[in-house]
């Protein structure tokens, strides 16, 4: 498993990458001006893109009204994920299993899921 970067260094690189996005410069010119190598720039951009931000929620609450819950309980439901994948939840899944599944999906995708 890859080591997480030092939080202060990661914050500095996030700020640097944000400056780059607003600079209008090429990567090479920006790195020359900032005094960092393009290799470091690309390495940190990849590292921070792949890293789950500590501020990202691990769980996003989903609220239903009672009629939606009872309808879903009778027929099951589907969760459409980014990228086109669909998770089908069978009608015989318990409430605990459904909650765990939704929590796992949200944690794995780190995006808001609409049901």
Image (cartoon, rainbow, N blue to C red):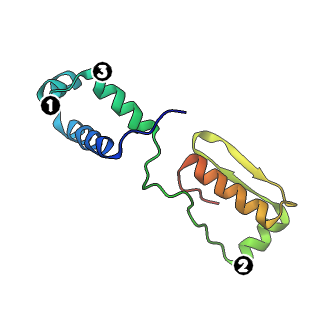
Query: Residues under labels 3 and 1: Cα distance?
Result: 13 Å
Q: Secondary structure at mark 1?
A: helix
Q: Residue at x 67, y 77 (%)?
A: 65
Q: Which mark is residue 34?
A: 1
Pointer 2 or 1: first along the chain: 1
**Are circles 3 and 1 on residues that touch, CB within 8 Å?**
no
Residue in front for this viewpoint, 92 or 49: 49
Q: Earlier in the sequence, mark 3 or mark 2?
A: 3
Which image quadrant: the C terminus? bottom right
Report the residue at 85% width, 67% height from top: 74
- For numbered disc 3, what is the local secondary structure? helix
- Report the side of 23 relative to 102 (left or right): left
Q: Specify the label residue 39 is tagged with.
A: 3
**Neighbour tally class for label 2: few under 14, some 14-19, many 20 plus, Cα within 10 Å:** few
Q: Which mark is residue 66?
A: 2
Q: Quadrant of residue 17?
A: top left
| Image position, residue 101 (x, y; %) | 71, 55
């Amino acid at each position: 498993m890859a080591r997480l970067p030092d939080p202060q260094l990661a914050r500095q690189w996030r700020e640097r990458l944000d400056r780059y996005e607003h600079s209008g410069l090429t990567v090479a010119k920006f790195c020359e001006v900032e005094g960092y190598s393009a290799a470091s720039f690309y390495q940190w951009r990849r590292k921070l893109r792949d890293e789950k931000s500590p501020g990202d929620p691990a769980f996003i609450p989903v609220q239903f009204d009672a009629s939606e819950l009872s309808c879903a309980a009778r027929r099951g439901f589907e969760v459409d994920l980014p990228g086109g994948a669909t998770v089908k939840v069978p009608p015989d899944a318990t409430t605990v299993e459904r909650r765990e599944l939704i929590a796992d999906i949200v944690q794995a995708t780190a995006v808001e899921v609409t049901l």
